[in-house]
Image: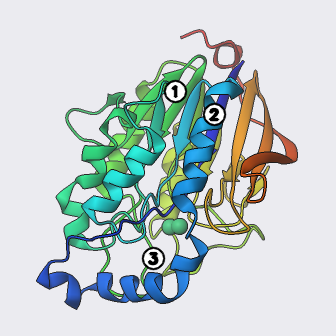
Amino acid sequence: MIRLAHLSDIHITAPKYEWRLRDWFSKRFTSWANHRFARGFLFAHAEEVVARLMEELPGRGIDHLIFSGDATALGFESEIRRAAQALGVGTQPIPGLAVPGNHDYCTKSAETAGHFEQYFAPWQQGRRIGEHRYPFAQQVGPVWLVGVNGATGNRWPWDAAGSVGAAQLQRLRHLLADLPSGVKILVIHFPICLSSGRREIWYHGLRDLDAVLDAARAGGVHLWLHGHRHAAYHLQTPDRAAFPVICAGTATQRRLWSYGEYTIDGSTLTALRRAYDPVARTFRDVETFALQLPVQDKAAVEGNS
Ligand SMILES: [Fe+2]
Ligand SMILES: [Fe+2]
């Protein structure tokens, strides 16, 4: 039996940004205006909420933390550094896994700068193919967590889509095929579908979703964990997938702030959703649910690897 904590979309910002001239002519400018005059209000308490969560988690018997992206608002280095510090990456005792979200690669230059990978490096340790950062796999008892990067630096202000890309997909197929038996959990920022079961709109979803689903199916994935959508949800059998999905939602957005604790025992996942209470300044239990993971072989369930 293992216990995971899953949080996402904390959207931490910083008091000062490292503006470059090119940023004013990129998506970053409109993203900044959107954050400054609209979204910023929703995340005004983000740092405080993360601090409270990180104080509480060590007492909750968590074996591993999963962070599924959107650490920042605009993908500036100062924001990424601050977010990694807030989460205690490399300093707090619970090991973690992290993948970036579309906000962390706000622009092409934010993607190529590699700041997310730099500051979240302790949460990106694991098995990988050669020197390539993504995908990577971490073992937690009988479970393999597989981190996949779906974020891409996009050009247009409205484009919040992502893709895994052919090269990473090829590596994902190899990585999944070579993993010793165990429960395989894919962690990526982007969803398979909305809470309604419908597909994401093209400028907000994973462009190569069908190919990623093919690779996941072929590689025997048992569960897909993601963020990106800020209201949490889960589906036992989403369309086109042979495994359940859980969207962590946002951990820090006003009124939506929550995270999930998952206990995996054999092929049963029991989830507890905990939401932030801004008056008591603590997290409280708000929902429980169970999912059946499509684990076929006994070795996987027992973790004989
Ligand atoms: Fe987000
Ligand atoms: Fe996102």
Up the image or down, 28 lies above or below 106; here it is: below
In the image shown, does 27 or 86 lie closer to the viewer?
Answer: 86
Q: Which residue is mark 1?
A: 94
Q: Residues within 10 Å of mark 2 (few under 14, many from 20)?
A: some
The amino acid marked with disc number 1 is Ile
Q: Secondary structure at mark 1?
A: loop
Determine whether label 1 and label 2 are within 8 Å by CB. Answer: yes
In the image shown, does 242 or 250 lie closer to the viewer?
Answer: 250
Q: Residues within 10 Å of mark 1 (few under 14, many from 20)?
A: some
Residue farthest to the left, as pictured: 21
> Residue at horizontal 45%, vertical 65%?
208
Q: Is residue 249 visible?
A: yes
Percent position of residue 137, x then y: 43, 31
> Residue at horizontal 71%, vertical 15%?
298
Q: Which residue is mark 3?
A: 160
Percent position of residue 249, x then y: 65, 60
Mark positioned earlier in the residue sequence (1 or 3):
1
Marks 1, 3: nearer the viewer: 1
Up the image or down, 274 lies above or below 39; here it is: above
**CB at mark 3 closer than 8 A to ligand 2?**
yes
Mark positioned earlier in the residue sequence (2 or 3):
2
Up the image or down, 241 lies above or below 136; here it is: below
Q: Which residue is mark 2?
A: 57
Mark positioned earlier in the residue sequence (1 or 2):
2
